Image: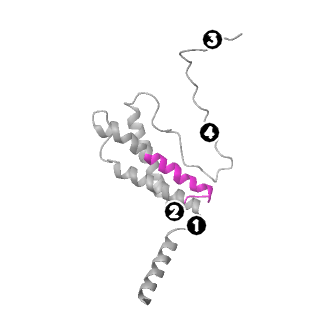
């Protein structure tokens, strides 16, 4: 019994050492888990050795989902900055890898997909040390309507 209690205490101490104290709130932990889950799902479906192309099924069906999942992971992990000024060092590599790979996939697919890009390529992780937050770009102008409204009197 004493050996089992000691092993459990050591396991708990290792878990506490693994995650920074700033992430003890339930909200931050939920965001962290969600971001890592999105990252792992995107990574599992990714084919890093294959360039997305309209001539292969993966490039048409799966690559957009992988890019969106990895982009979502980077954005969700960036939300942790609401609880602390910087992303913890153990999560930063995941965010960087997700952001880099999602942008690479989106840029490749932009060459053969018609219409809007599958994700906003201008998004970057927030710089919380900036003196003034960077303003969001204005939304794109809406195209003129094909069916304009008739003037009313």
Between 42 and 100, the one lying in front of the other is 42
Q: What kind of element bears circle 1?
A: helix
Residue annotated with mark 1: 24
Q: Position of residue 48 (x, y in %)?
A: 33, 48
Residue 150 got which mark? 3
Tell me which residue sits at (52%, 51%) in the image: 76
Residue annotated with mark 4: 136
Q: CA distance from mark 4 to mark 3?
A: 34 Å
User: Disc 4 vs disc 3: which is toward the camera?
Assistant: 3
Dot placed on the residue nearer the N-terminal end, 4 or 1? 1
Look at the image and give the residue range highlighted in magenta: 69-87
Residue 137 position by quadrant: top right
Q: CA distance from mark 4 to mark 2?
A: 27 Å
Residue annotated with mark 2: 89
The local crowd at label 4, few if under 14, some if 14 to 19, many if 20 or more residues have their Cα within 10 Å, is few
129 horizontally vs 66: left or right? right
Residue located farthest toward the right when viewing the structure as drawn: 153
In the rendered view, tell whether residue 148 sits above or below residue 7: above
């Amino acid at each position: 019994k004493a050996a089992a209690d000691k092993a459990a205490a050591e396991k708990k101490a290792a878990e506490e050492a693994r995650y920074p104290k700033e992430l003890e709130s339930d909200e931050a932990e939920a965001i962290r888990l969600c971001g890592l889950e999105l990252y792992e799902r995107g990574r599992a479906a990714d084919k890093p050795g294959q360039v997305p192309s309209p001539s292969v099924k993966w490039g048409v069906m799966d690559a957009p989902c992988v890019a969106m999942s990895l982009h979502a992971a980077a954005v969700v992990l960036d939300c942790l900055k609401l609880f602390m000024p910087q992303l913890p060092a153990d999560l930063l590599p995941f965010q960087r890898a997700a952001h880099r790979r999602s942008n690479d996939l989106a840029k490749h697919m932009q060459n053969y997909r018609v219409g809007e890009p599958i994700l906003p390529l201008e998004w970057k992780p927030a710089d919380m040390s900036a003196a003034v937050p960077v303003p969001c770009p204005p939304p794109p102008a809406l195209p003129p309507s094909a069916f304009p409204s008739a003037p009313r009197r």
